[in-house]
Amino acid sequence: MKASSIFALVCAGVILVLSTGCNLDDKPGLAAARSSATIASEVSETGALEQLSSWSDALYAAANNSNRQEAYLLLQRIEGLAAKKDVRSSGTPAGWHAFDLSLQAAKKAMPVQGTASLWYTEAAKLKLASDAVFRPESPLWLQYEGVLRDDVQRIRVSWQSQIEDRAMAAEAAIGIYGAHIDRLEVAALMQRDAGSIEALRDRLAYIKEIVNAADSGQVRPEAVIIALDSLNDSASALFRKPGYEGGEAAMSEALPPGMTVGQQRETSMQVAELFISAFVMGVLGYAGWRKYRGVQDKGLPFSGNKNKR
């Protein structure tokens, strides 16, 4: 076999491995060994979780449009579906307890005039929580990592401003941070330990105390900035995937300032795509060079037009 043919086969193999994410399964018969009953059960559970997520999305849309009648009907459907045992096999007991509380809060607030913002918030919580159990590998609530970083920056800018009421402005920004924690809490409890949320809330409460103390001269103003850094650390711990000594947890610690795990993943994918593209271009260039050398070795003039006489 010619060297060029061997090289082409090797290149094809490398490209195939790269395109499949190097997922070499050493147990190809494992999936076939699973019983049909187990597969059917998983399909049923996935279908129920998908329906729960779909109804929660519709509830959020109805709340956004202030459609009380449709929203209340969807709440009843969600309540019935969420009570099923196969649905609750995903998530955590603490997460489902918080889910039930949010559901009841929305039902209680909905008939009362002037509470649209309240049940809209509860609808957002249910949407994020349903998505977390339906898509546990890439849930929407993880996008709040960047949101909370922006909130911290807003608190920092408010505190470092030269306005007279900078403490009041910082407290308003702290309130926004707290509202965002409230919104993601149910979803986070579906996938994280309750202690992570409590630690984040404790840090936020401490920030508020430090702002008031610094404003009254009891502590130095720099203490607020130090406390904000600790708040960022607590938030980062919440968004890391639990149970990993390396991998995602270590990656989070090594991220440049201001970059989230999601942004780092996107950058890594772009680098991989560039590598594959460069590799393919190299293969094509080598093939063209081999063709050119073959023509030259035969002593024939090289031309891109074979029909030219």
Image: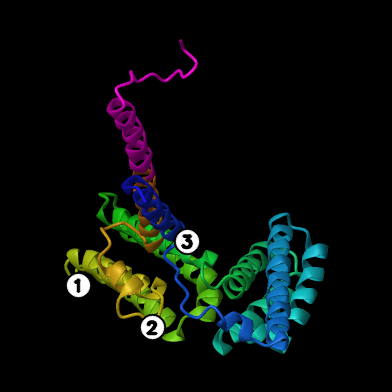
Find residue 195 and name its label.
none
* Of the image marks 2 and 3, the number of the one nearer the N terminus: 3
Is residue 96 located in the magenta-colored stretch of the structure? Answer: no
Give the image quarter of residue 132: bottom right
Q: Residue at x 56, y 86 (%)?
A: 92
Q: Which residue is mark 3?
A: 20
Q: Position of residue 172 (x, y in %)?
A: 42, 60
Give the image quarter of residue 97: bottom right
Q: Is residue 215 left or right of residue 64?
A: left
Question: The magenta stretch spans which residues?
Answer: 280-309
Q: Which residue is mark 2?
A: 243
Q: Residue at x 56, y 83 (%)?
A: 30
Q: Secondary structure at mark 1?
A: loop
Q: Amino acid at mark 3?
A: Thr
Q: Which of 237/72 is in front?
A: 237
Q: Which of 87/282 is in front?
A: 282
Q: Secondary structure at mark 2?
A: loop
